[in-house]
Amino acid sequence: MESRVGKLLIAHPNLPKHDWFHKTVVYIYSDSPQQGTLGLTLNVRTNVTVKRLFNDKGIIYPSEYPSVYKGGPVTEQSIIMLHTPEWASTNTIPAGSSYRISSDTLMFQKLSLGDQPAYWRMFLGLAAWAPNQLDRELSSSFGWLMCEANDDILFNYSEEEQWEAALALSSQQMINSFF
């Protein structure tokens, strides 16, 4: 099985509206036949700001921007930051060849002092699939589309606009594969 790390899962347009993943885009950061698949839902904005997360930790953050996103319906208290690879904290791990994830108190301190990666987004929770579960969903007619991630899709869009941009990217990558 080829690793899906670094790929985007884009909810199929036929996915029913009542499904939690309706019109979502998920970045896959871990994929193993033994452990399953982990990802971050990129485009479900919460009412929480990064400033509020900082305040909860007793750290001052100078801006209300940006929003925090709901990474998924699993471990919703977990705070995870997806970011570009030139930056690191004490608990930073690879999340594909072009991205990293961090989750620790030092990342808050560094960000509050202006030490931040070129691109980043903060999440509460994550999306998780048991071993072979995502394989079954990918073969379903209401499952997922998949494509390579890029900075623009990951960090410059949100909500339904991000899903639409990811659909367009997936279509373009599929067409390019034929030529």
Image (cartoon, rainbow, N blue to C red):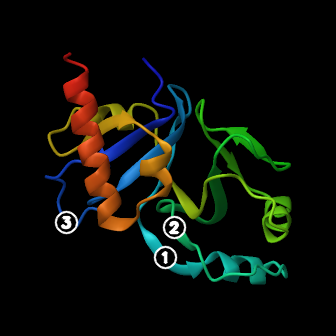
Q: Position of residue 46 (x, y in %)?
A: 49, 76
What is the secondary structure assignment of the residue under circle 1?
strand
Label pair 3/2, CB-CB below 8 angstroms: no
**What's the distance in space between the residues labelled 3 and 2, CA to CA?**
19 Å
- Tell me, for residue 69, which label it has, or none: 2
Q: Amino acid at mark 2?
A: Tyr
Q: Amino acid at mark 1?
A: Thr
Residue drawn at 44 percent across, 39 percent down: 149
Q: Which mark is residue 102?
A: none
Instruction: Say what secondary structure mark 2 lies in.
Output: strand
- Chain-order first, disc 3 or disc 2: 3
Residue 19 to residue 61: above or below: above
Quarter of the figure that contains the C terminus: top left
In the displayed structure image, the side of residue 66 where residue 46 appears, left or right: left
Camera-near label (3 vs 1) is 1
Residue 38: image location, x then y, percent:
52, 43
The reply, left or right, for residue 53 in relation to residue 135 is right
Disc 1 marks which residue?
Answer: 46
Q: Nearer the viewer, mark 3 or mark 2?
A: 2
- Amino acid type shown at disc 3: Lys
Q: Residues within 10 Å of mark 1 (few under 14, many from 20)?
A: few
**Contact between labelled residues 2 and 1, with CB atoms less than 8 Å apart:** yes
**First in sequence: mark 1 vs mark 2:** 1
116 up-or-down from 36: above or below: below
SS class, disc 3: loop
Q: Give the quarter of the image for residue 132.
A: top left
Q: Which residue is mark 3?
A: 17
